[in-house]
Image (spheres, helix red, strand yellow):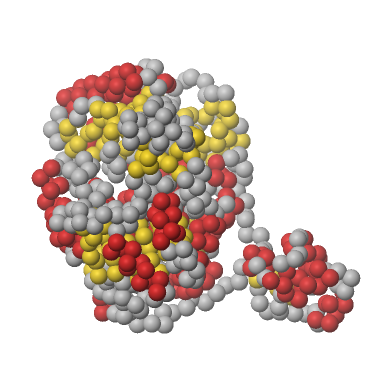
């Protein structure tokens, strides 16, 4: 008998019979209901009942895919987030292994070079009647390996359709050698660290062996990445491995280039921008120890790593580390837990650390290093406010900002304009009868996209034709507010000779488009870049000397207690894109509230004062990091069904709370979500707050099983979010 974790939304394992001994961590194909599913054997004692159990159909792994340490990590993650263990393991596996396939070695030779044992004149005589092969052969050289992707990009072979077929023919003739990826030397740092960087690196190296968390609070451009690189270099010299997490795919390209320049072929990526075969290859190399650096987004936290020596989490504050649906984990927090299980150090880095991380540093739980100066000769940009109460805007742009952009163009310098809103206008309305275009599936307004002349719902994705006139009173429509498309159009009218590039998810839909866009910016092809939050995250554009923030007031008066923190982080992060080269940077922030205390802290780039202010507010309000939250979410087609279900959830919770006598826990009343309906699902939520984390999990452990047993919950979608990052 074995226990199997099955990828179904049930918080338990299932027992099966097997004729052979199967070790925990092995994948098996099993019958489940009317399907065949791939499950993973876990070290849970099987049920000793006499009832009949089904047999395992097939054992997929000759040896376990998952090590005991990783199984422990997955089990801990499932318990902490109160999520089904089968779904946790399913999410952790690369897509190829979620199917009924055996483990395989993906390391097929993909590098090519001329065979040095055959003289060139003799080789050419063998292919005189095959001009394409001769052309392909001549593009290669002896003693230098090129990968297939590099060969494809060679101008000498641009007119050859079947390059791979030509290489195979040359290989069969012995003229070309097909080999594995060549090894590269570790390149030392050729520059000089400034005193702050040196001190931070010394603190990291001097820390005691084993698990500890080191937080680097370094302003934008202060050289945090170089500290990561040098700390990683020491691990690679000893033949060990390092996991590096970044919040967004858009950051990986720039980091990959820097890492490859230093560590060569030891760097491997894992994120959704690469195909399934590439993800499996990275998983395999990490597991067998041949990948020195595994660089990826949040899902890479689950990578099996044979000899893990260190973990790095860059931009640790970023909300993208939180998975917002399904298995709602936080990759930064799981990375810290994983470091403790492996007994290795972890480095967190940010220019604007999360309040939780900085509180841990102040309490002594984390080591703290602070970098207050930019690396090299660069200085922090000068920030100034544009008071929108005194300067009317023209399609979102104030006269002061327009003048500054004009000067940038005259000096051949680049500008970034930041507005965290896609589309042309967020509201399409009638100025006469006040009708507004709304989504028929969601309780939201539709955004007008001028490039497609469609109205789009940014929640469910449905699009509508844009009416030429108001459907109620037949008046002309007015498009209120500005998004990236409107700003792009306004700039085109103001500066017709400028090269304007839009950096948002409407324009950048693939990893290749992202890479091409970043290349265009870095090569100076774009004069003005109009971007959403995508543009603010860690990019190093040396040609940008002006940043304009179109609307800085979102978040100042939100009901979400995290809104000021997110606003402060966004403003400082995007401001930090300016002046990272030799030329000084400037930042123009358009706001209606320049006298707001938080805005003054942004102007002074004063994180310390902001942290102290936020910490005191949260302490008085008893919210994280001074308490722990869990959030029940429920969605239903019929409004009354969801609210009725959530009331039952609360009743179960209140009953358990009374019997367990957990005074630290408070269960709030069920409420409508701020956006009640999305994609025809009505949404409700129930907040649980506890000043003692252990008491919260003690309650939830029993509560979640009670909720699973509520009858007729098939008509609903419900979830439990531990440490929610978006409350509303």
Which quadrant would residue 203 be assigned to in this image?
A: bottom left
Q: Residue 187 in the image: x percent, y percent?
A: 47, 78
Taking the spot 54% from the left edge, 29% from the top edge, the residue there is 17
Image quarter hosting the C terminus: top left
Q: Nearer the viewer, residue 184 or 484?
A: 484
Taking the spot 71% from the left edge, 67% from the top edge, the residue there is 158
Q: Residue 271 in the image: x percent, y percent?
A: 49, 53
Taking the spot 47% from the left edge, 45% from the top edge, the residue there is 450
Q: Residue 333 in the image: x percent, y percent?
A: 32, 50
Q: Residue 612 in the image: x percent, y percent?
A: 13, 57
From this viewpoint, is residue 299 visible? yes
| Number of numbered labels in the structure image | 0
From this viewpoint, is residue 231 visible? no
Taking 187 as reference, is 584 left or right?
left
Taking 659 as reference, is 673 left or right?
right
418 versus 557 height, above or below: below
Which quadrant would residue 668 be assigned to in this image?
A: top left
590 versus 113 height, above or below: above
Which quadrant would residue 477 be assigned to in this image?
A: top left
Taking 158 as reference, is 332 left or right?
left
Taking 185 as reference, is 484 left or right?
left
386 versus 632 height, above or below: below
Q: Nearer the viewer, residue 258 or 554?
A: 554
Taking the spot 36% from the left edge, 34% from the top edge, the residue there is 430
Residue extending furthest right? 129
Q: Nearer the viewer, residue 443 or 194?
A: 443
């Amino acid at each position: 008998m074995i226990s199997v974790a099955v990828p179904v939304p049930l918080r338990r394992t299932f027992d099966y019979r097997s004729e052979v001994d199967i070790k925990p961590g092995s994948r098996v194909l099993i019958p489940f209901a009317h399907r065949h599913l791939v499950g993973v054997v876990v070290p849970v004692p099987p049920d000793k009942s006499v009832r009949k159990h089904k047999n395992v159909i097939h054992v997929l792994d000759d040896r376990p895919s998952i090590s005991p340490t990783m199984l422990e990590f997955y089990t801990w993650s499932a318990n902490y987030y109160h999520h089904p263990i089968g779904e946790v393991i399913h999410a952790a596996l690369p897509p190829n292994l979620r199917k009924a396939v055996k483990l395989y070695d993906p390391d097929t030779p993909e590098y090519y070079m001329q065979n040095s044992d055959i003289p060139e004149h003799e080789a050419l005589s063998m292919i005189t009647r095959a001009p394409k092969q001769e052309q392909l052969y001549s593009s290669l050289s002896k003693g230098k390996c090129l990968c297939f992707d590099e060969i494809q990009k060679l101008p000498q072979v641009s007119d050859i359709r079947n390059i791979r077929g030509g290489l195979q023919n040359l290989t069969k003739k012995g003229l070309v050698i097909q080999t594995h990826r060549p090894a590269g030397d570790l390149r030392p740092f050729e520059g000089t660290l400034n005193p702050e960087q040196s001190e931070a690196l010394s603190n990291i190296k001097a820390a005691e062996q084993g698990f500890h968390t080191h937080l680097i609070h370094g302003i934008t451009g202060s050289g945090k990445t170089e500290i990561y690189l040098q700390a990683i270099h020491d691990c690679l010299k000893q033949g060990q491995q390092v996991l590096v997490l970044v919040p967004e795919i858009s950051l990986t390209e720039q980091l990959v280039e820097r890492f490859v320049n230093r560590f060569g072929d030891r760097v491997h990526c894992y994120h959704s921008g690469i195909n399934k075969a590439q993800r499996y290859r990275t998983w395999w190399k990490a597991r067998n120890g041949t990948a020195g650096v595994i660089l990826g987004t949040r899902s890479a936290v689950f990578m099996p790593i044979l000899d893990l020596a260190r973990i790095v989490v860059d931009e640790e504050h970023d909300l993208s580390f939180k998975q917002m649906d399904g298995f709602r984990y936080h990759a930064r927090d799981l990375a810290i837990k994983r470091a403790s299980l492996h007994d290795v150090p972890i480095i967190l880095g940010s220019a604007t650390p999360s309040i939780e991380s900085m509180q841990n540093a102040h309490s002594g739980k984390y080591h703290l290093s602070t970098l207050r100066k930019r690396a090299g000769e660069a200085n922090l940009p000068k920030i100034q406010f544009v008071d929108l109460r005194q300067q009317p805007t023209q399609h979102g742009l104030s006269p002061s900002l327009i003048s500054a952009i004009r000067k940038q163009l005259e000096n051949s310098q680049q500008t970034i304009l930041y507005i965290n809103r896609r589309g042309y206008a967020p509201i399409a309305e009638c100025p006469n009868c006040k009708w507004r275009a709304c989504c028929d599936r969601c309780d939201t307004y539709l955004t007008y996209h001028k490039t497609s002349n469609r109205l789009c719902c940014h929640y469910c994705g449905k699009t509508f034709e844009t009416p030429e006139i108001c459907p109620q009173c037949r008046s002309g429509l007015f498009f209120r507010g500005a998004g990236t498309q409107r700003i792009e159009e306004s700039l085109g009218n103001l500066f017709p000779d400028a090269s304007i590039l839009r950096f948002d998810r409407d324009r950048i839909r693939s990893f290749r488009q992202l890479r091409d866009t970043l290349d265009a910016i870095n090569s100076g092809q774009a004069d003005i870049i109009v971007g959403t939050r995508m543009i603010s995250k860690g990019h190093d554009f040396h040609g940008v000397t002006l940043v304009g923030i179109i609307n800085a007031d979102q978040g100042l008066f939100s009901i979400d207690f995290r809104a000021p923190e997110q606003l402060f982080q966004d403003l400082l992060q995007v401001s930090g894109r300016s002046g990272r080269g030799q030329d000084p940077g400037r930042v123009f922030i358009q706001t209606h509230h320049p006298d707001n205390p938080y805005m003054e802290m942004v102007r002074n780039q004063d994180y310390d004062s902001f942290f102290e202010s936020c910490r005191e507010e949260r302490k008085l309000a008893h919210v994280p990091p001074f308490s722990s939250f869990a959030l029940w979410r429920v969605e239903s087609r019929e409004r009354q069904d969801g609210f009725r279900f959530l009331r039952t959830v609360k009743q179960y919770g209140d009953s358990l709370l009374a019997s367990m006598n957990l005074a630290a826990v408070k269960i709030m009343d069920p409420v409508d979500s701020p956006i009640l309906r999305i994609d025809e699902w009505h949404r409700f939520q129930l907040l649980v707050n506890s000043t003692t984390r252990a008491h919260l999990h003690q309650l939830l452990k029993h509560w979640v099983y009670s909720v699973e047993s509520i009858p007729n919950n098939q008509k609903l979608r419900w979830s439990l979010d531990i440490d929610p990052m978006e409350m509303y």
